Image (cartoon, helix red, strand yellow):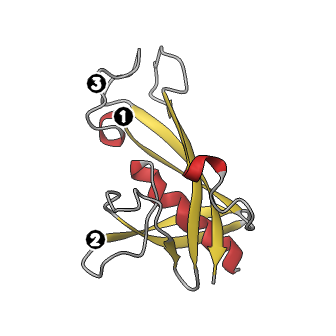
């Protein structure tokens, strides 16, 4: 169970900002999110602010037991607006901790999460939008994270 729970934590912090972080100062605003790890759905708590000294690579707290130390994030955003005439995916990203050398000798788990949002809300300040994308278009975002689970 812990292994599955740990995976989920890392995924969601990345979700809304491209990085996942969790345990921080007691005054840091935090959110909970649900992640799919194998056949399990986990709830994780992450900091809302990704500007820590660790650059968003802090551990994420798995509700119930343990935490996850993220080692990579990747994501894809597809425009699912009816009548969209551009090319999907409209955005992709990958971020690997330590140039693939971080925690590479430790067991890792993989989790994913998906959500919908408007392009403008998901990528504020991204201007101009990709070809064929309107700021009000609905996009489907899928994020994948690998992480080292710890009890």
- What residue did someone put label 1 on? 119
Find the distance from the CA under tag 2 to the CA under tag 1.
24 Å
Q: What's the residue at 71%, 59% (across, down)?
A: 104
37 displayed left or right of 126: right
Between tags 2 and 1, which lies in front?
2
User: From the image, which quarter does the N terminus lie in?
Assistant: bottom right
**Location of residue 50 (image quadrant):** bottom left
Whole-percent x and y of residue 105? 75, 64
Q: Secondary structure at mark 1?
A: helix
Q: What's the residue at 41%, 15% (across, down)?
A: 131
Badge 2: few (under 14), some or many (20 or more) residues near its Cα, within 10 Å?
few
Whole-percent x and y of residue 49? 31, 61
Whole-percent x and y of residue 38? 73, 62
- What residue did someone put label 2 on? 29
For marks 3 and 2, the one nearer the N-term is 2
Badge 3: few (under 14), some or many (20 or more) residues near its Cα, within 10 Å?
few
Q: Secondary structure at mark 2?
A: loop
Q: Secondary structure at mark 3?
A: loop
- What residue did someone put label 3 on? 127
80 displayed left or right of 128: right
User: From the image, which quarter does the C terminus lie in?
Assistant: bottom right
11 displayed left or right of 124: right
For marks 2 and 1, the one nearer the N-term is 2
Whole-percent x and y of residue 19? 45, 54
């Amino acid at each position: 169970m812990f292994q599955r729970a740990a995976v989920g934590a890392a995924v969601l912090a990345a979700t809304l900002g491209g990085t996942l972080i969790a345990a921080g100062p007691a005054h840091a605003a935090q959110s909970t999110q649900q992640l799919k790890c194998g056949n399990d759905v986990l709830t994780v708590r992450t900091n809302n602010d990704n500007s820590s000294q660790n650059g968003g690579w802090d551990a994420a707290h798995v509700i119930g037991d343990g935490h996850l130390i993220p080692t990579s994030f990747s994501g894809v955003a597809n425009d699912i607006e009816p009548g969209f005439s551009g090319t999907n995916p409209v955005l992709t990203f990958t971020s690997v901790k330590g140039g693939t050398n971080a925690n590479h000798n430790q067991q890792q788990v993989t989790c994913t999460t998906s959500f919908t949002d408007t392009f403008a809300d998901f990528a504020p300040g991204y201007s101009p939008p990709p070809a064929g994308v309107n700021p009000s278009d609905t996009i489907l975002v899928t994020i994948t994270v690998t992480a080292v689970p710890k009890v």
